[in-house]
Image (cartoon, coloured by chain):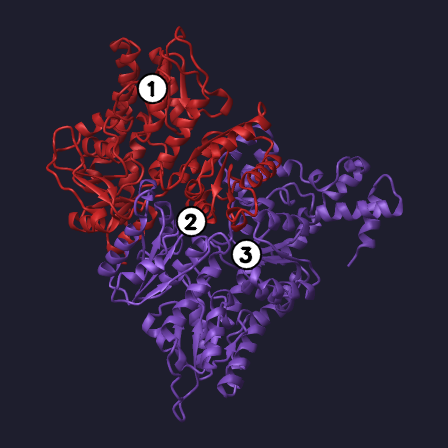
Chain colours: A purple, B red
């Protein structure tokens, strides 16, 4: 049994639903109790889709259990086919229906429906959403492309590829597709099929015609791509074009497979990240400590961009994609940090507190953690909330994706000059970092005034209120019991002049230095001795 | 399709529903009630014993409240628990241990059953008894089921309150008369009603759920209870079994509903009619005044209700009688004939009442009725908007203070806003 408040991934049938909702002409008949219909709102509310996802839930109740839930399932199947006239139906069970063992696949087959039935076995108590999506996509690809011949390529025809992996609810998938198509077009490569997003079962039958496959999200498309490689000998482009370097590598890798010259595509002026990162204003980004957590694809890409393209320092790297633990571990080693392979958001929160980052790149859960800890944050990976399906064009992939990333990671940080002024005028009563944003001056002033502040604080958003208690005891929480007594009041005051996000680290380093050098009472001198000792 | 056969009768006396449906339900399960219950009872923690789906449901439905650490969590059942490799009760004990260590402030731990825990027949009441032996008297452990195979949405609160009644102390036969108001109300509404009861001279008033788990009211033969919410079937039965008497009334929505609700209590407690008149007159006047400004937007507009919270008949009564709206179909997951008797009597003869749901057929009927405003859940709202209909998310009706005189205008505003908004937006979709 696992104790959890928030989950990074839903159950595997939600992954299957994402594939069904991505495609055209597919309907999913899900044996499930009524509560499971909440999944519809993921699409209609969070992604703001204009149509309901193509799913029929049997919504069986306790009173049906003693009778015939199988009959309910068969009725639902027949009705769905009649009403929605899909090209194919997916059938399966959610976690509760798995326990009653009605065998949706067998039942649907026995109905003799006049559409293909793809049965799904998604073990809810072992697997999760991304696995469910990958498995469903694989089953569909295998079901519709299986047993077909790979047509011979016509003489002189341009090379063609499939783009595999973009799905409903995928992080920025809608815009990434546009960027990737742009890159392929610049190389003169034809796009055969994009799947699952906007593909029909009929489109899947055409998959074997491509020369190779581009895998945008290994979490979802790798299983299917590996099968296509075995079955039709289609090579896989494995570089995910997130970041400038990866985009260039992607172009070279595709050019190699397509037998074309990448020079023109590489000589683009679309990349602004590289120059922005080099411009003098960006100097203040140097060595910013960044904590990264997300799905494997986005976390790996983020770590590389952070270190190699923006000059940050990765101070934490983790993922909830257990299947890709090896890749994350290798990358973490490269950047000299401990890999965090966990889907427990409390572990992640703990790791963030421990790492004292200046920027957090994560999912919506890390955004909330970062807000509580008052650390700047940008979202880089699913799961996300409605605000991460922006109205504007905001890809992550390709050169434009890199430009978007530059903006969205740098904007949450304080501007360079602002930071310098903070360093210089730390005791300006309106300006120090405990004051908060100047447009909230009235609130902050009241906060300082104590009792009166409580009333105003009550009107603050929940995360402000949650952060408030920590402000009153920011430092003692960082230090072991009784250790505060070792600090002279002057040293304690001097410590307060250090920015809050590194203050805990400074405290611990100083105490460690004091322990190691046998200093009992920590003075201002000790503080600065330790600073020199640990200077990087 | 046999299980979705719709039975269409002429509206009979006693207001039987015109349509009974059995098909796909598009309603949250009872677990979702925890989203407001965990805020209402401030020293309680709700631990769902269920699957990853339960945890995912809670965070998807409660997404907007993610900033503060909630007082609920899910103990996710895993393969090793099902295969017998791990003992479910030992596992649960370990989870509870970890949880209580993290939240020592919790005084009442509520184990909540889910679809999977019900299907595998995990006995959470027994688990609660066992844990109680260990943690009492510092903490109380209770259990109820919020599973979607037994409860829809607001019925989760009903199950919780029914369990809570078991925990209430016994009031002796010679105890002073007392009033229990059952059903979660926003704190601000509770405070308003408390002041009115006080002004009426009704003493010993308690609200259930209480804000703290150690302040549960005593219940006995001299207890009378008012329902503040229409979904409290089991809780009412439990109260009656304790000897308490139900005070039948309209629900306190709108000026009319609030007055009737307070009047029923006043009559039961022998309050002088002149005093009642004096105490309620200012509130009634304010409610009427607040509602006036909505007449223009709402009057004559036709509304269609998809089933959600069981509040639908009372809302429809308010909208038709106090805002002049036209009613098409009123869908409700379940109609409690006795508790809703007064409400149903006030509905116009020609309204279609439907109980249960077959969502595809109901969408067909909605298209046919072509209403000006559709009240529906989060899964349906945007698709209807994309088709050109105005919608009101039903879930907001359980998350917003809407009861009582001072909220009558706010309640009308919830329905008027989508209509005003449509009128304001000049861009085509």
- Compared across the picture, whether B338 is left or right of A12 comes to left
- Closest to the observer, B6 or A301: B6
Farthest right residue?
A518
Instruction: State the residue position of label 2.
Output: A99
Quadrant (top left/top right/bottom left/bottom right) for the N terminus of chain A: top right
Q: Is residue A358 above or below residue A26?
A: above
**What chain is tagged by disc 1?**
B
Q: Are marks 3 and 1 on the same chain?
A: no
Q: Position of residue B14 (x, y in %)?
A: 15, 28
Instruction: State the residue position of label 3.
Output: A378
Residue located at (33% from left, 70% from top): A200
Place residue A23 in its image quadrant. Answer: bottom left
Place residue A330 in its image quadrant. Answer: bottom right
Marks 3 and 1, Cα distance to the nearest angstrom?
Answer: 55 Å
Q: Which labelled disc corresponds to residue B240?
A: 1
**Mark 2, residues whose alpha carbon is within 10 Å: few (<14), some, or many (≥20)?**
some
Q: Secondary structure at mark 3?
A: strand
Residue B426 seen in the current view: no
Q: Position of residue B109 (x, y in %)?
A: 52, 31
């Amino acid at each position: 049994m696992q104790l959890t408040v928030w989950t990074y991934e839903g159950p595997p049938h939600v992954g299957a639903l994402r594939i069904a909702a991505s495609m055209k002409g597919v309907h999913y008949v899900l044996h499930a109790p009524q509560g499971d219909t909440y999944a519809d709102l993921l699409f209609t509310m969070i992604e703001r889709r204009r149509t309901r996802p193509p799913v029929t839930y049997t919504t069986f109740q306790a009173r049906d259990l003693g009778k015939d839930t199988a009959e309910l399932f068969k009725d639902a199947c027949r009705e769905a086919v009649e009403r929605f006239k899909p090209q194919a139906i997916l059938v399966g069970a959610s976690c509760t229906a798995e326990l009653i063992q009605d065998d949706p696949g067998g039942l649907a087959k026995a109905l003799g429906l006049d559409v293909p039935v793809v049965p799904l076995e998604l073990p809810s108590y072992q697997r999760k959403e991304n696995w469910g999506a990958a498995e469903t996509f694989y089953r569909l690809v295998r079901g519709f492309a299986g047993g077909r011949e790979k047509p011979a390529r016509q003489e002189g025809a341009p090379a063609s590829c499939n783009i595999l992996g973009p799905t409903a609810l995928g992080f920025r998938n809608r815009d990434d597709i546009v960027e990737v198509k742009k890159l392929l077009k610049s190389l003169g490569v034809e796009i055969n099929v994009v799947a699952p997003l906007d593909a029909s079962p009929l489109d899947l039958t055409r998959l074997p015609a491509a020369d190779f496959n581009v895998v945008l999200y290994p979490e979802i498309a790798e299983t299917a791509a590996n099968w296509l490689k075995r079955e039709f000998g289609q090579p896989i482009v494995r570089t995910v074009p997130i970041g400038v370097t990866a985009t260039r590598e992607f172009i070279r890798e595709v050019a190699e497979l397509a037998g074309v010259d990448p020079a023109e595509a590489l000589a683009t002026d679309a990349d602004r990240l590289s120059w922005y990162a080099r411009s003098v204003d960006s100097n203040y980004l140097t060595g910013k400590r960044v904590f990264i957590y997300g799905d494997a694809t986005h976390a790996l890409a983020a770590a590389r961009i952070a270190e190699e393209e923006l000059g940050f320092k990765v101070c934490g790297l983790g993922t909830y994609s257990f299947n890709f633990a090896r890749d994350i571990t290798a990358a973490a080693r490269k950047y000299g940090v401990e890999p965090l392979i966990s889907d427990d958001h409390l572990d992640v929160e703990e790791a963030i507190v421990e790492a004292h980052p200046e920027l957090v790149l994560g999912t919506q859960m890390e955004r909330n953690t970062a807000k509580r800890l008052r650390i700047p944050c940008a979202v880089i990976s699913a799961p996300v909330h409605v605000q991460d399906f922006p109205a504007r064009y905001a890809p992550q992939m390709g050169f434009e994706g890199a430009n978007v990333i530059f903006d969205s990671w740098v904007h949450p940080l304080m501007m360079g000059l602002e930071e310098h002024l903070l360093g210089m005028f730390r005791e300006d009563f309106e300006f120090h970092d405990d004051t908060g944003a100047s447009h909230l001056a009235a609130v902050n002033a009241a906060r300082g005034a104590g009792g009166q502040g409580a009333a105003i604080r009550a009107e603050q958003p929940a995360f402000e209120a949650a952060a408030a208690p920590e402000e009153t005891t920011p430092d003692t929480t960082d230090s072991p019991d009784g250790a505060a007594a070792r600090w002279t009041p002057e040293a304690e005051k001097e410590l307060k002049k250090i920015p809050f996000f590194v203050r805990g680290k400074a405290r611990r380093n100083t105490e460690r230095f004091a322990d190691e050098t046998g200093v009992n009472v920590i003075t201002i001198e000790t503080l600065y001795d330790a600073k020199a000792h640990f200077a990087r | 399709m046999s299980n979705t056969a719709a039975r269409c009768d002429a509206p009979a006396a006693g207001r039987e529903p015109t349509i009974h449906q059995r098909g796909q339900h598009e309603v949250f399960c009872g677990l979702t009630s925890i989203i407001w219950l965990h805020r209402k009872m401030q020293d309680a923690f709700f631990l769902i014993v269920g699957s990853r789906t339960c945890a995912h449901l809670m965070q998807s439905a409660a997404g907007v409240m993610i900033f503060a650490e909630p007082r609920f969590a899910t103990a996710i059942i895993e393969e090793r628990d099902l295969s017998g490799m791990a003992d479910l009760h030992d596992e649960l004990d370990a989870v509870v241990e970890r949880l209580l260590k993290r939240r020592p402030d919790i005084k009442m731990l509520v184990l909540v059953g889910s679809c999977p825990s019900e299907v595998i027949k995990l006995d959470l009441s027994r688990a609660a008894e066992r844990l109680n032996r260990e943690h009492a008297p510092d903490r109380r452990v209770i259990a109820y089921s919020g599973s979607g195979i037994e409860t829809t949405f607001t019925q989760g609160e009903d199950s919780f309150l029914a369990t809570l009644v078991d925990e209430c102390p016994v009031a002796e036969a010679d105890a002073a008369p007392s009033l229990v108001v059952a059903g979660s109300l926003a704190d601000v509404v509770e405070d308003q009603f408390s002041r009115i009861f006080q002004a009426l001279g009704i003493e010993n008033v308690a609200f259930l759920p209480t804000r703290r788990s150690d302040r549960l009211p005593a219940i006995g033969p001299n207890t009378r209870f008012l329902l503040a919410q229409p979904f409290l079937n089991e809780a009412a039965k439990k109260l009656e079994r304790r000897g308490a008497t139900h005070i039948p009334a309209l629900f306190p929505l709108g000026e009319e509903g609030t007055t009737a609700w307070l009047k029923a209590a006043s009559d039961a407690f022998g309050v002088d009619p002149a005093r009642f008149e004096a105490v309620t007159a200012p509130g009634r006047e304010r409610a009427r005044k607040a509602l006036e400004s909505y007449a223009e937007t709402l009057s004559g507009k036709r509304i269609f209700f998809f089933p959600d919270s069981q509040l639908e008949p009372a809302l429809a009564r308010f909208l038709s009688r106090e805002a002049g709206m036209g009613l098409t179909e009123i869908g409700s997951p379940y109609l409690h004939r006795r508790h809703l008797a007064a409400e149903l009597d006030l509905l116009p003869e020609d309204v279609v009442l439907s109980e249960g749901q077959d969502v595809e057929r109901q969408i067909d009927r909605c298209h046919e009725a072509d209403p000006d405003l559709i009240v529906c859940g989060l899964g349906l709202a945007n698709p209807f908007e994309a088709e050109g209909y105005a919608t009101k998310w039903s879930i907001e009706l359980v998350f917003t203070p809407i009861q009582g005189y001072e909220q009558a205008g706010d309640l009308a505003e919830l329905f008027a806003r989508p209509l005003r908004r449509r009128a304001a937006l000049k861009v085509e979709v």
